[in-house]
Image (cartoon, rainbow, N blue to C red):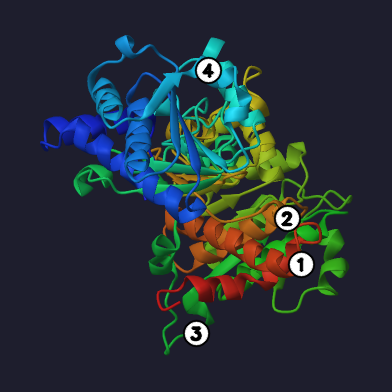
Amino acid sequence: MKVVTSSEMREIDRKTIQEHGIDGLVLMERAGMAVVARIKEVFGRKKVIVVSGSGNNGGDGLVVARNLHNEGWDVKAFLTAKPEDLKGDALSQYTSAVKFGVDIKPVKELLNKPSLITAHTIIVDALLGTGLSKKVTGTIAQVISFLNNSKVPIVSVDIPSGISSDTGQIMGEAIKAGVTVTFGLPKRGHLLFPGAEYSGKLFIEDIGFPKSLLDSEELGVELLTREDIGPLIPERRRYSHKGDYGHVLIVAGSRGKTGAALMAAKACLKSGAGLVTIGIPESLGKVFQSRVTEEMTLMLPDRGDGTLAEEAVKTILGFLGETADVLAIGPGIGVSDDTKEIIKTLIEHSGNPLVIDADGINCLKGEKKILKRAEMPVILTPHPGEMARLIDDPSIGIREIEKDRITTASTFARELNTHLVLKGVPSLIVAPDGKTYINSTGNPGMATAGTGDVLTGMIAGFLSQKLSALNAAILGVYLHGLAGDLAVSEKGEYSLVASDIIEKIPAALRASKRDG
């Protein structure tokens, strides 16, 4: 499902009206009726207060007020604008509501009489809509604060007032809705935090936009759903052997961080890779040999302190050239002059797809332009802190990245011609052309050590089964989150650990296959 900005949605509105001949009043009527239907479904019959602004969002709210009033509901409507200041479709809906006998008052009357809001009331927020581009101040900010403090359930029309449709950020003050009813397509602000939290339960309603506009390839952001994932899962032929499903080399671990390598390897095998070899500092050989079962090991030159020496790159390249199909590198390897040179050399000279995570990403601080020299696909999997180090701009830290995750990630992927998985809430998968996919799985219990190592192994495992870099990243991220969701249902958010996610990878695969 496509996800849009406010300007993209305006363009869909415009083309629907001007090029497809659907009147704006018709769309507004359908939008209002969709909200009415959801109010009935979620809340049943209640006293309703509708708070409308001066624009089309306010017009949608007045449709809600008119139709509920016409059905005999106790409805009161309040306007933040003077009736004479209304224009276009919003004015038409105001005129119609008045003729139907809806009680419409200035919003100050609501502010001055809090007793109008009772325990049996729900509030319909139709103040601002998706076009907000500046901070909310003055009377509107006062109204939003008042409504939030009422402790009454709020239904937002299109998007909670005060949330940026494009980034999910709070623009001064924002409605904390229990339910949001949006139209046509979800907006970025519904899915990015804090907007996702403020939107409550999101309903996406079809009000008659042409399917060709909603599916347009010009819309560069998509929300991943189960329907997208099933077709990506590789089929297992009856006549096949382990070599048909690829051999992954995972270069990971150092003294004190051996678990990262082992978890990545286990996740890789659970995701279907035929063979997995762990490339490890040779001084840690005994530690690993006592813990591996299905995995193999490749001893690599180290500096005598349990970290890789620069000469290890020759062994890695040789193994890739003769044996392995995919390389995953980074978890727990540490950051040193040697590991930095290893990472740079592999990006330039590997003949195999690469997944780079954790310390592998940190080794690229100040060296990101080398990604342009990669001859094979590279998938980077940073969390926001690692992303900030990759960008290496003093003005862009974690806070700036989180303010607009999509723009940050897509800009980086395009500029460096690389695949990017920006981990977080929600995780994003970005192709080199900037096309972005928003993940819909995962939970707070996954905020624990080792979950990133598991993801690295899963993506590498799918790459080894001949999926494209983009599809391997999409499948890995979605199933990683789904495995976490299945695990948390048994373990709870507080007790979930990374190995629990590994154990649920088979169940996540089964749940996502075409046949369910």
Residue 50, quarter of the rendered image: top left
**Viewer-proximal residue among 131 and 5:** 131
Q: Are marks 3 and 1 in contact (CB under 8 Å)?
A: no
- Tell whether label 2 touches label 3 (CB within 8 Å): no
Q: Disc 4 on helix, strand or loop?
A: helix
289 vs 204, left or right, is right
Q: CA distance from mark 4 to mark 3?
A: 75 Å
- Locate residue 58: give its quadrant: top left
Image coords of residue 432 (percent x, y):
42, 41
Distance, label 2 to label 4, CA atoms, is: 45 Å
Measure the C-alpha gap from mark 1 to mark 4. 50 Å
Residue farthest along the bottom direction in this orientation: 239
Amino acid type assigned to the residue bearing label 4 in the image: Glu
SS for dot 2: helix
Which of the two labelled residues, at mark 3 and mark 2, occupies the earlier sequence position? 3
| Residue highlighted by disc 4 | 109
Mark 3 or mark 1, which is nearer to you?
1
State how many labels appear.
4
| Residue wearing tag 3 | 241
Q: Is 28 placed above or below 454 here?
A: above
Of the image marks 4 and 3, the number of the one nearer the N terminus? 4
Judge by depth and name the residue closer to the eye, 100 or 157.
Answer: 100
Q: Is there CB contact under 8 Å for labels 1 and 4?
A: no
202 vs 492: above or below:
above
Q: Against 175, is 358 above or below? A: below
Which numbered disc covers residue 445?
A: 2
